[in-house]
Amino acid sequence: MYSRKAYGPSKDVLSYKAGTQTPTEIRDGYTEQQQLQYTKYLKQLRSEFQQRWCQPAQYNIEFSELERVKTLGTGAFGRVILLRHTKSNKLYAMKVLEKEKVIKMKQVDHTLYEKRILEAIRFPFTVSMEFSFKDNSYIYFIMPFVPGGEMFTHLRRMGKFEEPLAKFYASQVVLALEYMHFCNLVYRDLKPENILIDRNGYLKITDFGFCKILQGRTWTLCGTPEYLAPELILSKGYGFSVDWWSFGVLLYEMNAGYPPFYANEPMKTYEKIVAGKYRCPSSFNADLRDLVRNVLQVDISKRFGVMKNGAMDYKNHKWFRGIEWEAILNCRAPPPFVPKYRSPGDTGNFERYDEEPIAPASYCRYESEFMEF
Ligand SMILES: Nc1ncnc2c1ncn2[C@@H]1O[C@H](COP(=O)(O)OP(=O)(O)O)[C@@H](O)[C@H]1O
Ligand SMILES: [Mg+2]
């Protein structure tokens, strides 16, 4: 049965109180009045983001109180490990980055951004920082453990998502991107591997490794081949539009089970992307096709999310009919799928990885480069 409490957001996230809309209005999209009211709320969230951004975080926990349990994921510069706090039994996910690798891959600036953004961001559908540490060789970002695993794993297991599940997830990603862009953050790595499913079935976007505050345009080539926007591939100088393009790829992949632009080599994939050529499977209905066409628009001036109505183009699109945006935001809509989580610390939703020791050097490495961490 649908219970209001069971899907509630965590305490650190403000719950959004809607205005005086009637339920029928909510069900048929999102009115200008609702959006106006919501924008006030976003302004409040943005000023809180900016405050945290300017104030360095303080932590009152000892690194030695954290016990390593198991690896949850690995990436280019390190790994993410499940931890247990021995005093409270609370579980955390710790991203370990090796300073040397970060330097070799020229990612010091991105990593500093990742830390500061994780410390400042607070939204129901994003992870955030609990503590951070550094030692002679590594830096550590400690976040809440999101036990449902990657959307990627569930998508491959299920083949593709049934439409109500795809809609449920897509609506949360729209809200998360709207929030990030409102805070001037461009995310740049949206894909099912970076989207986690929480215990309540709702999403948590992780991995702010390419996220940054954007003033004007940027040129850095980063992201994941299948998810790169044409303007980014063409080195044109880009903005928030690249995240909406990736959202279009995600929307397609959730509904089809495979991405719209794919080839054996990245160069061939890029050719398809810049040509904007893809085919929808016959299972896509007219509303979904229409939405995908409006998002995977090579011409930025026509892309949903980038035009003057912003995220409202999504909130009022026919494919999202039936989504109650404010119920989603407050995690009060019943999730179509809840991952299995048998006991605290169950890692059954994650792949298995070989464990490797974390062995800090006996002297401090790259002290000056990581001074600000
Ligand atoms: N808070 C978290 N809870 C559970 N698993 C996580 C969490 N953060 C990351 N992971 C897992 O670790 C993987 C790698 O983390 P990520 O930040 O994406 O690193 P990378 O930058 O190397 O891709 C993720 O894809 C996910 O499987
Ligand atoms: Mg990642």
Image (cartoon, rainbow, N blue to C red):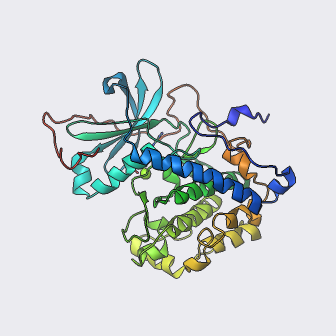
Of residue 46 and residue 228, the one placed in the foreground of this image is: 46
Q: Position of residue 264 (x, y in %)?
A: 43, 70
Q: How many marks?
A: 0
Q: As displayed, is residue 367 above or below residue 289? A: above
Q: Residue at x 31, y 24 (%)?
A: 64
Quadrant the N terminus occupies = top right
Q: Position of residue 328 (x, y in %)?
A: 70, 47
Q: Position of residue 371 (x, y in %)?
A: 23, 45
Q: Residue at x 68, y 69 (%)?
A: 291
Of residue 362 and residue 51, the one placed in the foreground of this image is: 51
Q: Seen from this angle, which residue lies furthest top?
A: 87
Of residue 279 and residue 44, the one placed in the foreground of this image is: 44
Q: As displayed, is residue 246 above or below residue 132? A: below
Quadrant the C terminus occupies = top left
Q: Position of residue 181 (x, y in %)?
A: 53, 60
Q: Seen from this angle, which residue lies furthest left?
A: 363
Residue 2, picture quadrant: top right
Q: Residue at x 21, y 50 (%)?
A: 369
> Dividing the image into four equal quarters, which quarter contains ligand 1?
top left
Q: As displayed, is residue 24 above or below residue 252? A: above
Residue 170, picture quadrant: bottom right
Tell me: 70 left or right of 139: right
